[in-house]
Image (cartoon, rainbow, N blue to C red):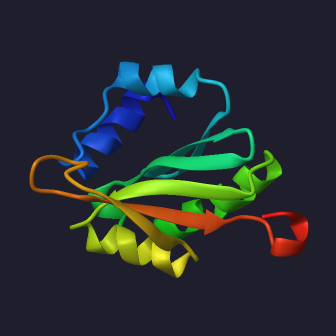
Amino acid sequence: MTPEALAAIHSASFTIPRPWSAPEFRDLLATPGAFLLTRNDAFLLGRVIADEAELLTLAVAPGARRAGLGRELAAEFAVTSRQNGAVSAFLEVAADNAPARALYLGAGWQEAGLRRRYYGPDLDGIVMRLALASPQEGG
């Protein structure tokens, strides 16, 4: 998927946080540890640094929602992150984004913190964490 296609899906999916541009996607994809997972009309951008993964964004075009694409990408994110050495993962999600929060909770993520006004003066961010390794594996 091209940076332009990523930006188009992101723009159709988000107003808050603001949609990312094609140059921003191009720059993020060039950073060490970044990886892109795609499905038709959906993608997830993540990265692994040391033993920690971050889910940067997950976007599903409006017409492709409720078909399990987000769930598939979230599961693949966990596998890919683990394969790249991560033992835990983090993300931020807007406090008012109930569908995304439900998706992540259903995928095993746990709410781990709150970032007040992270998405603007009236919108907090929820920090979520996912353990990627079992305790006997060191995670």
Q: Which quadrant would residue 21 be assigned to in this image? A: top left
Residue ID at (56%, 47%) = 54
Image x and y of residue 63, in percent: 29, 61
Up-down: is 46 above or below 31?
below
Q: Is residue 121 left or right of residue 19?
A: left
Q: Is residue 121 visible?
A: yes
Image x and y of residue 82, in percent: 77, 55
Image x and y of residue 13, in percent: 27, 51
Q: Which residue is farthest right? A: 136
**Relative depth, front residue between 84 and 70:** 84
Work out which quarter of the rendered image holds the C terminus and state it: bottom right
Q: Which quadrant would residue 89 be assigned to in this image? A: bottom right
Residue ID at (56%, 75%) = 107
Residue ID at (74%, 46%) = 51
Looking at the rendered structure, the number of numbered marks drawn on it comes to 0
Up-down: is 22 above or below 109?
above
Q: Is residue 87 left or right of residue 129?
A: right
Image x and y of residue 75, in percent: 63, 66
Q: Is residue 67 visible?
A: no
Residue ID at (35%, 59%) = 93
